[in-house]
């Protein structure tokens, strides 16, 4: 399986603090059946001031540490980008890594706040699409406004956004409300990717298998494989380092 959203790099955000913990996270991922991970540190100007060059330095060090530990996890650079005008400025400076590419469009993992859907969010989405960037909305099922009214996600789908669910939402680890929305979105065939959004070894582990089993039982093995293997693989296979701006 391929994990398109996880915080494995140490010291960059609210993911692992130490390199030792980060190495253990990779060990857990491999034991779960994950062969490739797109590492997605938060890019949240003013809170987590990460950018391409900085992430690259940390990623290289992490790759070396995994090689030394004999852990066969293939790593790709990515980022989880907060909805904000400052993020747009960073994008224009080519300092925001994408998580993949699809039919000539770069795919950007875009994070909404947990509490609400900001005013102006759709304008930002439109701007991104005009820039040939397809937003992949990170875990919409965990957004409070979407949990209160799942129809809040419809404008994003209509605009052409893709959706990423967190694996733990599918199995109920984020509560009944998030699980209900996650299942509705799966029923509607509105999901592109299921990913771990792993942060640590305790509450937010890099494991896809439980969600894969759950989805296989309810929606079929092909759906589970599409969400955790084929769609991610397609996005990574078409990926180039060229920036679309
Ligand atoms: Fe995340």
Image (cartoon, rainbow, N blue to C red):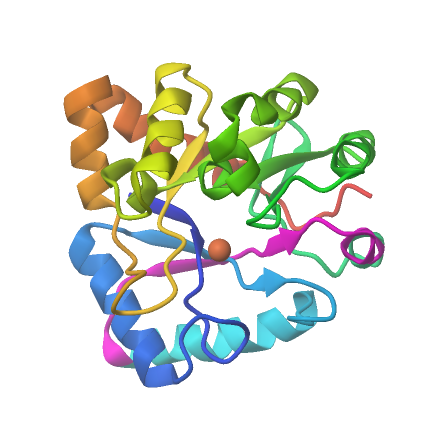
- 66 magenta-colored: no
Front-most of residues 104 and 127: 127
Image quadrant in which the C terminus is located: top right
**Left or right for 79, reference 210:** right
**Left or right for 123, reference 51:** right
Q: What stretch is highlighted in magenta?
A: 69-89
* Residue 23 horizontal/vertical position (percent): 31, 76
Residue visible at 76% across and 55% down in the picture? 87
Residue visible at 20% across and 50% down in the picture? 33
* Residue 139 horizontal/vertical position (percent): 47, 42
Q: Can residue 67 be seen in this view?
A: no
* Residue 47 horizontal/vertical position (percent): 67, 71
The correct choice, above or below, for 198 with respect to 160 in the image is below
The correct choice, above or below, for 116 with respect to 180 in the image is below
* Residue 214 horizontal/vertical position (percent): 18, 32
- 81 magenta-colored: yes
Quarter-of-image position of residue 1: top left
Q: Is residue 85 visible?
A: yes
Front-most of residues 218 and 145: 145
Front-most of residues 215 and 28: 215
Residue visible at 84% across and 52% down in the picture? 92
Quarter-of-image position of residue 117: top right
């Amino acid at each position: 399986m391929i994990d398109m959203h996880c915080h494995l790099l140490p010291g960059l955000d609210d993911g692992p603090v130490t390199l030792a913990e980060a190495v253990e996270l990779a060990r857990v991922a491999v034991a779960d059946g994950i062969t490739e991970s797109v590492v997605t540190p938060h890019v949240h100007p003013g809170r987590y001031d990460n950018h391409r060059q900085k992430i690259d330095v940390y990623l290289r060090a992490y790759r070396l540490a995994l090689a030394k530990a004999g852990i066969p996890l293939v790593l790709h650079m990515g980022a989880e980008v907060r909805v904000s005008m400052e993020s747009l400025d960073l994008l224009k400076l080519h300092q925001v890594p994408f998580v993949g590419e699809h039919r000539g469009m770069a795919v950007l993992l875009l994070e909404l706040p947990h509490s609400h859907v900001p005013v102006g969010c759709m304008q930002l989405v439109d701007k991104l699409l005009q820039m040939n960037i397809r937003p992949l909305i990170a875990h919409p099922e965990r957004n409070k406004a979407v949990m209160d009214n799942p129809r809040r996600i419809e404008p994003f789908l209509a605009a052409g956004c893709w959706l990423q669910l967190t694996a733990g939402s599918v199995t109920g680890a984020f509560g009944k409300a998030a699980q209900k929305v996650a299942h509705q979105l799966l029923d509607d065939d509105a999901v592109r990717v299921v990913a771990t959004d792993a942060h640590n070894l305790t509450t937010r582990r890099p494991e896809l298998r439980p969600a894969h089993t759950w989805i296989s039982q309810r929606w079929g093995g092909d759906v589970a494989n599409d969400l955790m293997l084929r769609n991610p693989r397609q996005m990574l296979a078409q990926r180039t380092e060229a920036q679309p701006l």
